[in-house]
Amino acid sequence: MKIRDTARFWEAHGLRLGSDEGFRCGPADGKVRGVMVCWKPTFDALDAAAAAGCNLVITHEELNFPPVYGGGQMERQLTGGVTLARIRRVLDLGLTIWRGHSSLDRLCILDDFASALGLANPTIHGDYWERTYDILPVTLGELARRVCERLGMGPLRVAGDLAMSVRRVALPWGGVAISANPHAIQDLLRYEPDALITGETEEIPMLAALDAGVGLIETGHSESESPGMRRFAALFAEFFPGVRVEFYLNPRPWSYFSPIAGAEVGDAGA
């Protein structure tokens, strides 16, 4: 099977591709030797694909830095820096990159983040991602503990009173809760959640949540999307039974450091 033929998966599932999706780098005419599915095409993921004998990498996040949501365009980063280095690595290893972003968000990413957290039966208020989950009352601190347990994580960041009661949760997954997407949190706040369980976020959205009287638990961008990418790998393998499909779990790129203990605290996302 040719690399280009793998696009049939999106066609068969009726998934519309955005302008930032599809084949992004590398040849599409060669024969598929193996497929590596990962969250982001970092050097470690690309090297893992080559070591596994895979020549097609299907990724959720983009090659280029700065990213599109930060105003970046691939053609503007081809004289040096991160983008050029990644493209060189892709070509040196003989790989081809396909990006599935919003199409995979709709197919499985958000659903599987909720499933990983043990949440079910969402109320969908507007677009597919405007969801809230009503749960039995629990404190924010207990909810954070459960998130750690469900995702197998070490320490995470929590904003809000740990003793506050949570009955309704919303999930701005991935990068939905970053400052570049202020409308997303504003939209979710209309449905009166008591807490947000986010992917990646930073202080400005945290402060917004606090002033709205809403708690916030941050899991991380890759942590919130990797469960869905793992299931996508299984769906892709089922659709193409003759193709070897591997899944690479991108490790969290940071860890906690305590100057008192003089050592890392918690896991490094491995």
Image (cartoon, grey):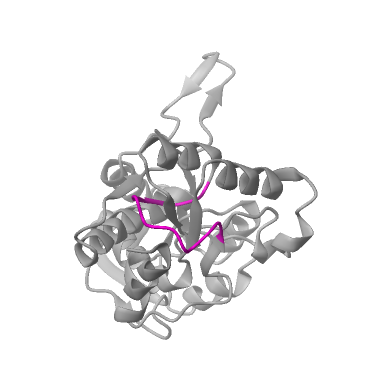
| Residue 219 drawn at (x, y percent) | 43, 48
| Residue 71 drawn at (x, y percent) | 73, 65
Which quadrant would the C terminus be assigned to in this image? top left
Which residue lies at the image location 43% right of the left edge and 78% below the top edge?
191
Of the pair 109 and 166, the residue shown nearer to us: 109
Main SS, magenta residues: loop
Stretch of the chain drawn in magenta: 25-41
Is 29 part of what is drawn in magenta? yes
Which quadrant would the N terminus be assigned to in this image? bottom left
| Residue 183 drawn at (x, y percent) | 59, 75
The answer to whether one can see residue 113 in this image is: yes
Which residue lies at the image location 33% right of the left edge and 59% below the top edge?
228
| Residue 106 drawn at (x, y percent) | 38, 74
Q: Is residue 264 above or below residue 126?
A: above
Q: Please tell me how many numbered marks the rendered image carries.
A: 0
Is 103 part of what is drawn in magenta? no
Q: Give left or right: position of 170 versus 239.
A: right
Q: Give left or right: position of 4 versus 112.
A: right
Of the pair 63 and 179, the residue shown nearer to us: 63
Residue 77's quadrant in the figure? bottom right
Which residue lies at the image location 42% right of the left edge and 77% below the top edge?
130
Residue 239's quadrant in the figure? bottom left
The answer to whether one can see residue 161 in this image is: no
Q: Give left or right: position of 83 versus 169.
A: right
Q: Residue furthest bottom?
A: 126
Of the pair 170 and 213, the residue shown nearer to us: 170
Of the pair 94 and 173, the residue shown nearer to us: 94
Q: Give left or right: position of 249 versus 252.
A: left
Which residue lies at the image location 50% right of the left edge and 57% below the top edge?
97
Q: Is residue 11 above or below residue 203?
A: below
